Amino acid sequence: MDCKFVSECGSCTLNLPYTEQIEFKKEYIEREFKDFYAGEFEFFASESIYYRSRAEFGIYHNKNQISYSMRGKNQKFVMIDECLKVDSKIAAIMSPLLKYIEKNQNLRDKLFGVEFISTKDELLIVLLYHKDISNLKCEFDTLAQEFKIFVIARSRGKKLISGSENLKERLNILQREYKFILGDGAFIQPNRAVNEKMIGWAKDCVKDSRDMLEMYCGHGNFTIPMADKFSKILATEISKKSIENALKNCKLNGIDNIKFIRLSADELMQAFAGVREFNRLKKINLSEFNFSHILVDPPRVGLETSVINFIKNYENIIYISCNPTTLKENLKELSKSHKVSKFAIFDQFANTTHIECGVLLRSKNEN
């Protein structure tokens, strides 16, 4: 990546030609997981620039001038005026947005951060302040209208919305388009193109299916496209807002075979064990499901021992991991009951050492 800040900015940690980055990551994963899998490691590459649909920058003030900032490699922060990793819509607006804010003291004063969230058709910016913003709604509305974007301004205990706090996204998965509504605070896969490949890979993992159970489902990023692979899906997530959007996304895509339930992993396991009843499950009969697959997409800490022991009961496990270290630890236990039959590497973050993986495990008790 021909970035003028690459020697100073701490964001890009792998300064190699992209073909060499691919080899570096493949060799690392193959070496780390050779004890679990001897087959082909599929690699799903990213664009090397303009790929990131969510990005956050600090704001550095020098009297009446402001600059974007990122953490530095050899210093606390470095001032930048562009970023080649971000989505092209974000890259195009970064400079004019900063100049607009710089000229307006009300918008500039006490601004300490800017977050950008882009979809295929829309763009949202979130402005973060160390001051009371209660009287600035008109300023934010004008900013939104000027750039034809959505704007959210946040300060302690205050949130102002100009336009909408939700974004519409479109994903193309195996030649079919899916529509989503995303909240500004929702977890989203930051590399749209690789996310599409990742969902497609997960769908290709499904053979001889019945029903699916999904944990950590978010707004339905995997769930919605997986629906046509199963008779029924039960999907759980702890975030109330994510569940609300997941239900909307079902309607958007004309899907009626998914039950989204707001339950934590512990609550789900309690429900299946019959040790506790939940009002949220009063319209759902768990015994009516005949699960052939379970899909888990846990946070970086991976799966707790209790969850590992729970998912061991399922024939097929599709495990999406954002941390190879915790994935390896989890596989030490899961490999006692299951065998890895597919392994994929997803390069969500080009120019960094970060690696995401997908693993399909099949029960050793199944033929």
Image (tube, rainbow, N blue to C red):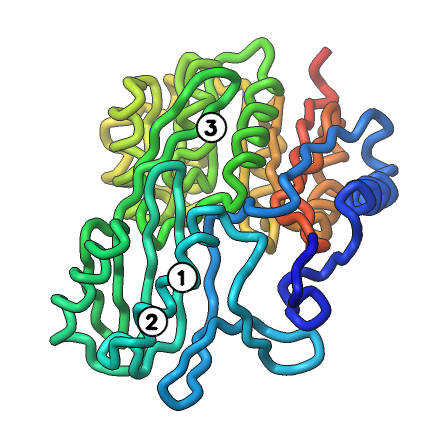
Of the numbered discs 3 and 1, the one sitting upstream in the chain is 1
| Residue 122 shows in this picture | yes
Q: Is residue 278 left or right of residue 287?
A: left
Quarter that holds the C terminus: top right
Q: Quadrant of residue 114?
A: bottom left
Residue at image coords 32%, 52% = 124
User: For the point 87% across and 43% down, which residue is it?
Assistant: 31
Q: Is residue 202 above or below residue 125?
A: above
Amino acid on which the number 1 mark rests in the picture: Glu
The picture places residue 309, in percent across and down from the top left corner, at 61, 40
Q: Relative to 356, is 282 on the left or the right? A: left
In the rendering, at what x and y percent does residue 308 appear? Answer: 61, 41
Q: Which residue is mark 1?
A: 115
| Residue that mark 2 sits on | 128
335 is higher (above) or lower (below) than 162: above
Q: Secondary structure at mark 3?
A: strand
Tell me the distance, in whole angstroms, between the alpha carbons under discs 1 and 2: 8 Å
Q: Position of residue 287 (x, y in %)?
A: 39, 21
Camera-near label (3 vs 1) is 1
